[in-house]
Each structure stands twice: as C-alpha cells, then as structure tokens.
Amino acid sequence: MIKLNSKQCRIYRVRVNDLEAPFLYNDPTLEVCHHESKQRNLNYFSSAYTAAVSAVDPDAGHGELVIKVPSELWKQGDDLKVLKVYIEFSLDQPKGGLHFVVPDVEGSMAERGAHVFGSCDGKMKIFSCHRFWFPCVDSYSELCTWKLEFTVDASMVAVSCGDLVETIYTHDMRKKTFHYVLPIPTAAPNISLAVGPFEILVDPYMHEVTHFCLPQLLPLLKHSMSYLHEIFEFYEEILTCRYPYSCFKTVFVDEAYVQVSSYASMSIFSTNLLHSAMIIDQTPQTRRCLAQALAQQFFGCFISRMSWADEWVLKGISGYIYGLYLKKTFGVNEYRHWIKEELDKIVEYELKMGGVLLHPTFSGGKEKDNPTPHLHFSIKHPHTLSWEYYKMFQCKAHLVMRLIENRISMEFMLQVFNKLLSLASTASSQKYQSHMWSQMLLSTHAFLKSISNVSGKDIGPLIKQWVDQSSVVKFFGSFAFNRKRNVLELEIRQDYTSSGTQKYVGPIKVTVQELDGSFNHMLQIEENSLKHDIPCHSKSRRNKKKKIPLMNGEEVDMDLSAMDADSPLLWIRIDPDMSILRKVEFEQADFMWQYQLRYERDVVAQEEAISALEKFPTPASRLALTDILEQEQCFYKVRMQACFCLAKIANAMVSTWQGPPAMKSLFTRMFCCKSCPNIVKTNNFINFQSYFLQKTMPVAMALLRDGQNICPKDVLNFILDLIKYNDNRKNKFSDNYYRADLIEALTNSLTPAMSINNEVRTVDNLNADVRLILEEITRFLNMEKLLPSFRNTITISCLRAIRQLQKNGHIPSDPSLFKSYAQYGHFVDLRIAALEALVDYTRVERSSAELQWLLSMAQNDPVHYVRHKILGMLCKNPPFTKTTDSALCNEALVDQLWKFMNSGTSHDWRLRCDAVNLYYMLFGLTRPSCLPLPELGLVLNLKEKKAVLNPTIKPELGVGAPDPVSLGVCGVGQPPQGLKRKADTPLGSPPEPGQVLQQQDDDGRGARYKIRVRHEDIDMETVHDSQAFIHHHLNLLERPSTPGTHTHTHTHTHTHTHTLIAEYRNTHTHHCRGHYIHVTSYKQALDNKKKPAKPGSVRRTSTSAGRG
Amino acid sequence: MADPAVASGGPLNAGARGSAGKATSSPAENYLLARRRTLQVVVSALLTESGFESAEKAAVETLTEMLQSYITEIGRCAKAYCEHTARSVPTLSDTVVTLIEMVTNAPVTPKALSAGQKRTHPAHIPSHFPEFPDPHTYIKTPTFREPVSDYQVVREKAATQRRDVERALTRFIAKTGETQSLFKDDITTFPLIAAQPSTIPYLSALLPSELELQALEETDSSEQDDQTDGENTAGNAITDDPGADKENSMLPPSGVVPSTKASEDNVIDNPYLRPVKKPKVRRKK
C-alpha cells in the first residue's frame, strides 16, 4: 500500500506499473467532527482534530490517498524494485494551496496583472500545504530531486524551484512551457510556483539572481533589491559557505499569504514590501524580510528538518544568523534592542498563555502525556498550532540559539553551522546514493552532537532547561547595602508556581556599578538560597571630583549629589546579557535608575531604566529623561521611549509641573525655526535619528493631560500648527509616515466627550477643538484620494482617529465608513485598519450585525491574509469572553463558529487554527454557557438510538461507546449519526463526507456493513480509514468509465487553472520513496521506486505489507 | 471773376455739382471730391488773403495738390509714430514730432499750459532737438510694495495658501462626486470623498505620486534621473506587453529592460532572458 498526501484534488484513476490500482481518497480534516455532535467543547474538537491530522501525517507514513498496490506487483515491491505510479487528477476551484489574483478589469490576463502563486504559509513552512495542489508526500523529511514543467500562456512567466533549463513554445505558439530541474534533493513542501506577467530584473551584482515583480513596479523592484547582494555576501562570509543553490529568484506577489516565504532556490514576498527611494520607514523592514528569506534558504530549505520536533533547530539557526545580520547592518544597539524586544514578547506570551515548548517529545503518544496541557490546541502537529504560538515558538527558538552562543562562543557556533552545511552539500551532490541524503535533514540530536564535537562543551543543562521544557523564569530582585560590612545584600526570589514559569537553578550574572567602577559577579541560584552577599569594592564616602569608570572603560564625571551618601552603589543590573529567558522585576531607588539611564551605555539598561522611572514622577526623573532626549549620541529608540515616559511623568506631576508642557521647548529647539519658534522648519529627513524623534515627540506630547484630564490647549494648537506648517517640498524623502504620526497625535489628544445626558451628536454641538481636529482629518482623508500616500498610511491614521472620535462620543458611532474601507479592492493595510475599527465597534456597541458581517468576511473574503487578520483581531479584542455575559453569545453563534472551524476552513490550516483560537476566546474549553444544557442521559440516549435504529452495530459499540465523552473516538457514532443527519437539515459546507453519508441511504446500508467487516479485517488504525473505505467504494460506483472526458469537463469549469497552468511534470527520485510524476493536462503519474536502505523505508514497506 | 466763384460758391457748387455730376460714383469718391473742394476753397482763401486777385485754375490745382500731399504726409507720419509707440490713436505729441520731422516749427505750447522747470538738454543732445517736456510728464514716483521677505509671513502665507487650495479642491471633488459623512443629519460640513475600491489597489499605494516625483526632481536631480528612467522603462513595458504576443515574445515579456542593460555589462547569462525556443516537431507528448 502506498500512502500519499493530497487534498482538494479530484482523482480519476491510479495505475501502478500500468495496472489499475484501487485507491481510497479520504480527507479526515475536511470535517473534523463527523456529525452533528452534541459535543460542543474545544477539548473534544482539538483531540478530534489532532487525530484527524495524525491519520494523514506523512511523517508517520499516512496520507489522504491510499493506493492499494495490485497483488501482482507485491513481488516486485518485495524485491525493492521500482514501482511507477500514475495518478490522474484535476484540481477544481482550489480554495487553498494555490492563490489566484485576477483583478477585475478589461484586458488579457497579462494586462490585468493576474497571477497565481503557491500560497502556502511559506515563512512558516510548517503548514506544508503542497498536498493542496498535487499528490505528494507532504513531509520535510522525504527528499528527492525534481523535474518540473509548467505550460503557461505566452504572456506569462512561470517561476519555480531549481534551474530553468529551457522555455519552449507549444505548437500553436500561444503557450510556452518552462522546464525546471532541481538537482538538489528537496522535500515537497519546499517546492513552489508563481505564474504571472512578471517583469524581470536580473540582479546587477549577481547575475544568477533574478527578481520578479508585477507590471509597473519595476522601478520599485530595482530600488528595493539594490541591497540584496550585501545580504548574500554577509551570510556566505559568516557561514564560509556558498549559497547552496545555483540560482535564486525573488517573486513579489499581491495578496501574499505571508510577507515572506522561502522555498528551494526561490522566495515569494508580498508585493507591499517594495518601496521607492523616498520611503524611510519601509526600507529597514524590507531589508529584514529579505535577510530572513535568505537565512531560511540555508536553514529550512537546503537543510530541512528531520521531523516536526526538530523544527526549532532550523527556525532557531535561521533566526540566529538573521540576528547576526541585524547586528552587522543596523548596529549593536539595534540588535540588543531587538533581542530585548523578542525576549519581552516571549516572556509576556508565556506568562499569559502558558509555556512554549520547543522540542516536544511524544513518547507515549497518548493524550495523557500531552506536554502542554495548558494549551487549547495540540502541539503534536504543525497543523494544529495557533499562529500566535508558532510565532512565539520561532522567537524562542532563535533566543535559545543565542543562549547556546553565549555558552559556546560565536566562533564555535558558526563552525557548527558550517559543518552542517558542508555535510549537507556533500550529501546533496551524491546523485545516486540517496541514503546519504539524510545528512540534509537536521535533527535535534544531530545538532547537539555537532555542537559537542565542535566545542567540546556540554550544553545539556541548557537544552534541558529551555528546549525540552517550556516556560520562562520570573525573578524578583531587591537589595540592601550593609554599611558595616561594606557588602551588598542582594535578594533574588523566583515565582515558579504561576503559569508559564519554571524554576531556574544555575549561574546568574549581576553587574554592580560602584563609584570605583563596574564589577561583574557570577552568583549561583540554588534551591533555597535567596540572599547573596556581594562585597563592594568602593568606600562609601567618595572622593570628590574623581571620574567614575564605566563598564566599557569610559570615565565620566557625574553629579553625585543625588546619591545616598552612605552607599557606593550607583546601580545594579541582574542578568545584563539576557542569558536567561527571564523577566526581572528589580527594585532600586529612583536615583539609581536615573544614573543607570544617564550613564549606562547599554541600550537595554537604558530602556529598563526608562520603564522603571515611570513609577518615579519627580523633577529628577524629568531632568534625566530630558537629558537623554537631547543627547544625540543616545540610541534613537531609547530617546523615543523616553518621550512616552516623560509624558507619563508629566501627567503624574501635573499639579507641580513647572514651565511649558513637556517636550514642547525641546521640540521647538530641535525642529523649529530660530526666528519664529512657532513654525516648524521645512522637512529635511536626511538625519534619520532626528526624523524618528520628530515623528515621535508630537505623538507623546499629545498624551499630556492637564488638571481636568484633558489635553492642554497649547499642546493641541502646537500639533495643529505642525500640521499647518508642514512643508515637504524641499525634502528628499516622503513625509507620509510623519503626517500619519501627526494625525495619530491628534488622536492621542482626544479625551472622552462631556456627556450631556446622552444627546445625539450633531455637527452643531461639536466641541470647538474637535471641530478643528475633524477639519484636519477630513482634509487629509480627502487629499489622500487625490494623492495617495505610500501604503495609504495617512488614511489608516485617519480611520483610527475617526474610530477614536466615535468611541469618545464626539461624533455618532457608526460602522458604515469602516465597512466601505474594509471592502475587497482597497489596499490591504487599509482594509485591516478599517476591520480593526469594526472589531472595536463590535465590542463596544455589542453589535451582532457587525459580528456577523465580520464573520462572513472571515469566511468569504478572497484574501487569505485578511481572513486570518479578522479572526486574529477578534481574538485580541473579543466582543465578549468566556467569563463575561453578553447578548451576543448565543447558540446560533456557537453553531456558526463550530461549523466554521469544523468544516468551513479545511483548505487553510492557519484559518482553522484562528477559528479555534476565537472559539476558545469566546467560549473557553468547556461547553459554551449559552448552549442549553445537554439532555440528561446523553449516553443512554445515544445508545438507545443506536439500539433502536441499528442493532447490528452492537459489536462496534463495544469498542467505542462505553465512553462517548472520551476523546479520540470522534468517528464512532457515525452510523446512527448518518441517519440523524437526514432528519436534520444537511450540513451544507463540506461536500465529500456529507454527501457520502447522504448517498448511502438505501443501497449503501448493506454494503456499508460489509465494509465495516472488512475494516476489521484489514485492521485499519483509525476511524478515518474506514471512512475512506466507505467513501471509496461509493466513489467506485460513480467513477467515470472514461476519465478522459471527465478531465475535459473540468478544464472548462476551472478557468484559472486552465489558462495559467496547463500542465506540469515533476520527477523525483528518492531514497525511500521517489516518485516519477509525469503530468499531462491534469494527469499525473507517480512512480514509486523502492530502493534499498534506510530504516524508514523498511518501516514503510512493512506497513504496506501488513495492510495490503 | 472766377475767384469769388471759386472762393465763395465753390463748395456749394462743387458739392452740388459733384453729387449731381458723379451721381453714379461711390460715396467714398464723393467724400474724396468733397475734401478736394474744401482744400481748393482753403487754397483760394489763402490766395485771396495773400492779395491775389485771381488765379489760374491750374495754379490753384497745383497748390491744392501740394497742400493735400503735405497734410497727408503729416497724417501718415503721425500715424506711424503713434503705431510705433503701440497706440492706435495719434496724440498731439505724435503730430508735433511729425511736424518737427518735416522741419516746420512746432507749435509752441501756450505758456499757460506749461508747468515747472524744464530740463535743459544734456551735452550729448544737439540743441536743435526739441526741449524736454514738462517735468510732470516724465517724473515718476515708485509705487510698488516692498516684497514680503519676513520668513514667518512667507511660511504663514504658503501654509494658508496650500490649505485653501487643498480645501477648495477637495470640497469641489466632494461636491461633484459621491460622499460619505460622519454625521447622519449633516452631510455638508465634513464631506468625505467616498472610498472607491480599485482593481489593482497596490499600484497607487506603492508607486510614488507625480507630485512626489516632482518634488524629488527639485531636490535631487541625480536621484530623480534614476526615477524617471525607471518610469519610462516601466511605461515601455506596459505598452509593449499587449502587442508582444507574437513578434516580441521571442523575449520573455518586458525582459527588454534588463537585456538592454545586459548588453552594457556584456553578456548576462540568465535563463529568463534567453529566447524562447520553437517547439521541436518530432518530440511532442
């Protein structure tokens, strides 16, 4: 028996070595819970879903398509001879996998800029969805070489993996065929395709690199790609290894599934990453995306994972070398800032949602061993993961790589990578020794072994702590200075009981800045020791006028008058290098934070100090922050953060605040004309640091509040003046982000309207300030229609402002404006902003109409990303939660959402997981409270029903029925349920299983039970297999006698496929299961070679034998 | 004998006769004759004044002829002067200049009409040239306003102007097209131009607007060159594409752009730039 992955495809016929082979095609994930179950809880769903995914898991040798090798060929199989498998299939209106973008305008497909691409969650690469568009072994661990052919319209270009060998016209000269060869063994999920009327740009620095973009965007492409060669050089240099593929292609497509996705020798990006030379803010982001894509080319595409549990190694390495690139390009400050940001993110997520486990081991394979019981989804398969979780998983993976680097040094780290890459490239050139190819797959074990070989160090404890175990560490630190002993008594406590935390035992670094210098101390955190005594080096009474040495060797003058006269301590830092995944809450006096902010040179320390100073609204804090703001040597992101902190402090000190509003005079000094201080200089953004500061300060200032808790009049006027006098004519750069930020500042200045007994808001009773603000917003919004800004940033800010005005009761709350901007056909950023406003509206107004509107868009919108975002935003800002009561929470909604995740999202893993998240957010794990109580004696009832309806089922009941509530028996109730369904309204959404159940009503009955019996015979492991059997047998009855004609009809029904991809062919040869696929007009042949070797193949063969 | 007749009865007779005798002639000719008669009368009167008793007809005719050409010449010259100074109706000064030109003594402006102290000729002007006119005719007092150079005011003005233009423009567009409103009861105070979905939304969102390109042009010419260059090639690519089907498709669509570049950098061997091969007849699946 051969099992392959395939979804959505209509399979007409399968032949093995020219012999017709019976096959089963069943996709258990189409509908997760196979009946109108009374069970409406997530625990049930999630285990059923996990079971469904397991049932077709290619890593476990399963698949949706099960081909029974004809008995005549068994002998050949046993002799390990090559089997050739032909599969004829068509793809009819695919909902997932391939994404078609066809703008609705006149003209040919090429003129319209229509294109198609593999819309797999490429970046993630976990949700391998290749089974959506052709039958394959959809696993990263099944390598083979490829030959691919695509026939497309003559005006189109087909970009795919590997080398383009030649392009040939078809006989009528109206189409051309692109022939690709990928000689490097590659797994199916790393294969992709993009077809469109692309403009082609050969990289001027590297001729083997080709860039593709949609028509008219070539100038942007030229500019955006002008930097790529430097990234190439960087990676090749640090890895001391050539880029493994002979060519590289970047394709920029519209409506991309994710921003960046990497495949073997090609990457697909969102077209929105392209920008012109005038755009500042987008530039670093685009470069980061390029760098990420390229890092994944080495680790992720060329070297791929052995199994899902090893995913963290690849994500970790690619994330880690991407970090090195950041450090080199954007500087150490940016790098450390980024590390802190990522660390804060993962810490926050784990503390809120529970731990993220990098290397799950499923020894028992039973639910009881679930390593992450706190999650509402299973982490056993990539397909069941929540998107958010996976993002955090990646984040943690690269942070852990950095921890390993801290432990073994960067040199060793890079040596390890180099070793892995050179092993892999040696292996990849072994054309006929496919057993060597396993070197191209990386497992946790191999990685760790390589590390210990290269470095000779044991990183076992580190791995155990952060990889094999989830959660982060939470420290609380405080100290006292013992003057008599001249000793610092440091107390470090841990919280390891709350969710997402673990206990840390081991070394921790503490840095103490004293008067005589900075000193590092390694402390040992042990089971029960909280207190640590650290001897101080300096005498408390200081020698005046002496310069104070800092950690980096610098010596500075400090005004020490603020210090405690008795102690020589300036500031203390716990784990300054971030070598533990932790959150530290440390208590020290305000002046210490102020010294730390002013004099510590590490940006992380400065940022920590700023966050801490929020709690100390004193003139001294104000001074420290203002000084930092003015200091040009200081990292700009620190200065930006200081703006917001200063606003908070000013608000806390409102009664004692002296002088003009915070930052106003500073801004005037920095950015306004000398002669007329109320007028801002004409824009000149040559200096990016001051550009970012100029953008940020008004936004922070608008957060200032006076005694009545409203924004001071002169701050508002100041911002309005900035808008009025903004003049970008002499600027080399676009000011769209700046203007968007000024609108954001206006938004920030809004405070709730004085409520005058709930009167209706009209133009006449508009507050005078609000009128001014509204005037500006109207003008901006209207101007944007005539002169759109880059990525419509200004409209986005305006929409947010309008929502804020509505929310604060200044103007009537009304969703219609947002709805019009949320429509398909607007720029995607704009749509997301409008949808965000709608989500907020739904929550505030508790509008069920809007909720329905959003949900229907989440189900029907053509853009995957928008659908994903709608659900994501609903989760972040839910209309109600499991703990609150709401009129919105009703049975119909539960049903709708249930159906959506159960069967409406089978074509998109990500969307399904989003829906699961939302369901969890709204209703929790258990039965939603709004549902009527389940009928008493459900079990009994079910049994009765069964008994009444079908006594023959009894033997089965023995297996499944004793505990219907128990998980993982989702399919058991089928026979009675099938009958029940007939009585109810049929479940519309999923065609296949539903139909099957319907069709079988009369004639199927007898047959079905026969199949049941057979099912026992052939020992199918899961219920899904039996389902497949039923399905298959029914299908047999309906199968067209002449598949050719059938194919024909389908080519007509599906125009997209017809025009764009007429045919493709691929060849893989493979160590354990190579395929030779030859497709002509939707016919595919698959050839299966069984080669000697590998435990994997043995396992597979034996399963096959057992089954067959 | 003839003189009185000529002098007194002339005009009337001439008029009567002229109109009678040349009844058939055109009115223009009539006027011509009438003017001639008038001149004859004038000449006769002058002769009489000068003490002539009588004159031969031929002599009167000749004198009339002379007078007429003299007057015509004055008129022609005066007209030429006036047109020379871009006017259409001659003024007194035109005539005066003419008379000077024709070496006649210009009529002297009556004393009562002249005012102020006339300027004397500078050395380089010969004394026979006419005197300067009265000072009031050429003395000027500058009346333009000082250009505003105060930075604050300029900025203020520029800002207001831009704002006004923008507001007027957007209001106009809003008035002439579909709008959305934030208030249900009042749709005119803050009219928002309705959001129109576009078929290819990313184009307008990503490509810099004309205005921005223009601004760039002003600030940095080298940068800008690059830009328009790109623009042109992009434009070419678009216009090329539709027609590209048969002939041009020897190259992949819009592959034109890099390939021209390729020729500069010598050969770039990129598979996407290679020509598409013709199908081999023999080998067909």
Image (spheres, coloured by chain):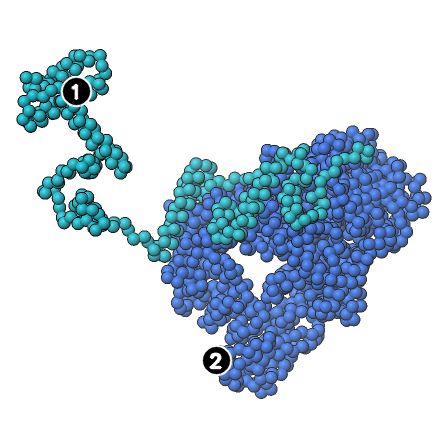
Farthest residue, direction bottom? A484
User: How many other residues sit within 10 Å of disc 2, few (<14), some (14-19) or many (≥20)?
Assistant: few
* x and y, in percent, of residue A657 in the image: 41, 68
Question: Is A790 displayed left or right of A157 in the figure?
Answer: left
Q: Which residue is mark 2?
A: A561
Nearer to me, A1030 or B260: B260
* x and y, in percent, of residue A952 in the image: 84, 39
Residue drawn at x 83%, y 43% as measured from the top left: A1076
Nearer to me, A180 or A783: A180
Residue drawn at x 59%, y 45% as measured from the top left: A217
**Quarter where residue A940 is shown:** top right
Question: Is B153 displayed left or right of A463 in the figure?
Answer: left
* x and y, in percent, of residue B108 in the image: 12, 40
Q: Which chain is blue?
A: A
Position above or below: B68 against A936: above
Quadrant for the C terminus of chain A in the image: top right
Residue drawn at x 66%, y 58% as measured from the top left: A231
Same chain for mark 2 and mark 1? The answer is no
Label 1 marks a residue whose chain is B
Q: Which residue is mark 1?
A: B34
User: Which tag is nearer the camera, tag 2 or tag 1?
Assistant: 1
Position above or below: A433 against A334: above
Label 2 marks a residue whose chain is A
Label 2: which secondary element:
helix
Q: CA distance from mark 2 to mark 1?
A: 117 Å
User: How many other residues sit within 10 Å of disc 1, few (<14), some (14-19) or many (≥20)?
Assistant: some
Nearer to me, A241 or B217: B217
Label 1: which secondary element:
helix
Residue A191 seen in render: no
The amino acid on which the numbered mark 1 sits, given as a three-letter code, is Ala
Q: Which chain is cyan?
A: B
